Amino acid sequence: MTEAAAAPFFDVLIVGAGLSGIGAAWHLQRGCPGKTWAILEARAALGGTWDLFRYPGVRSDSDMYTLGYAFRPWTEGKAIADGPSIRRYIAQTARDNGIDRHIRYGHKVVGAHWSSIDACWRVEAEHDGRRVWLRTRFLAMCSGYYSYDEAYRPRFDGEDAFAGRIVQPQFWPAGLDYRGRRVVVVGSGATAVTLVPAMARDAAHVTMLQRSPTYVVSRPSEYGFAQRLRRWLPARAAYALTRWRVIVESMLLYRVARSKPELAKRRIVEMARHQLGPGYDVDTHFTPGYKPWDQRVCVVPDGDLFRAIRTGRASVATDRIQRFTPEGLLLESGRLLPADVVVLATGLRIKLLGGIAITVDGKPFRPNDAMSYKGMMLSGLPNCVLTFGYTNASWTLKADLTAAWVVRLLRHMDREGQDVAVVHREPGVEPEPFLGFTSGYVQRAHAELPQQGSRKPWQVYQNYVQDMLTIRYGRIADGVLRFGRKGAMP
């Protein structure tokens, strides 16, 4: 008997112990209490993104009433929470529900191989420098959407001549001392607008260098209506009402932004102008050339980025890098930005399904050749669900729906005596991009992302209520999802 054939067997293996993985485990043990399961986590700690990122000021750009779990109220004061608080929240959820006992740390999944004959996945992982095998009936991929090992890192002329330090937020060096130093943060996304005000507290000056502007919106770090509800209602009821209020408000604002983009653009720019005061060149630095939500809108709690600029602790330069010099950065305009520390907040590198090598009955599986079913399964990939959150709302909203649907699917398969669930591409369904974003990290990953289809159930909705009706209440046996017994692909 081979090592893979003798490997321990689980009904479900969850890959990733971040927000999605811990949430999936909660749903699984509650909805399918008799099933065996484990979480495989490549790192030495849980938390996913919130354990990986340790740069100054790291925080969520989504509110915790929707980024938090539906089943566990967020009780801290700040709605826009810092990374350590989110990490504690995930860890407490895992500990209080006994989920932490099922996590196998240091297990980096590198391969998954499906056998229709056995209706089973053979999962290959690296642990303590050796290869280990596990078998499972069902794979729940909760490993996020980007590489933990590699960020997008453009190279610039003259880097070797630079006398200062070049760092990346994803791999923040412990003990980096930037007090009294001149800092340039290259980028204009969520990471950059977080870093600038946080570093400006101690740096001599921080400049955010951007090629083009991003929409930036100030929101309160604490929601007054949430605090009022907590005074009058039990914690769970207050949390649920706050959660739904935020969901509805966000959906309405998104719909207005997409249906009336010029109105939304004008309003966002006016808010930035009000924050920055008369005389500031908002047209150059805070007026994007694209429509709101063509790329993600950045949120700054209590306007901290704008406040850092107003007080002179930070500034924005909209230009392109020509090359590094010993003193800093020479821009295409001819301006020299002096710098002691340059932070390249230039984006993530998308890596779907954790970048693992997947085969189906011996044939390599490529996500780019597949079509997404309800934003959760990929065509031709049996007994496997991919957790992928929203781009216009909190990730956890979709992750929660996905986890609950997995429970429904497994229970349906048990009732019907089925071993396999798979979808296949249907004729006549036109392919469309999986994500409609124009952001650089999405465009760079076009060859790695699957497609969505021109009609349901192949469409990827960016709408929680629509997804809730489709995923939570829609039929499992919808005529597209196929079921079968072991021995052959249905």
Image (spheres, helix red, strand yellow):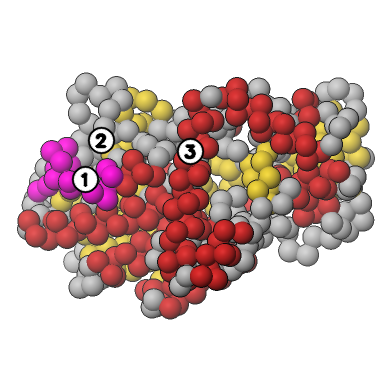
Q: Quadrant of residue 39?
A: bottom left
- Mark 3: which amino acid? Leu
Task: Give the magenta range.
Answer: 469-484
CB under 8 Å between callouts 1 and 3?
A: no
Measured in 3D between alpha carbons, the distance from the residue under mark 2 to the one under mark 3, in whole angstroms, is 24 Å
CB under 8 Å between callouts 2 and 3?
A: no
Image disc number at residue 457: 2
Image disc number at residue 484: none
Image disc number at residue 252: 3
Measured in 3D between alpha carbons, the distance from the residue under mark 1 to the one under mark 3, in whole angstroms, is 24 Å
Q: Which residue is mark 1?
A: 474
Tell me: 132 left or right of 145. Answer: left
Report x, y in % for residue 63: 56, 54
SS of the residue at dot 3? Answer: helix
Q: Nearer the viewer, residue 115 or 439?
A: 439
Residue 105, above or below 427 = below
Report x, y in % for residue 292: 58, 30
Residue 231, above or below 285 = below
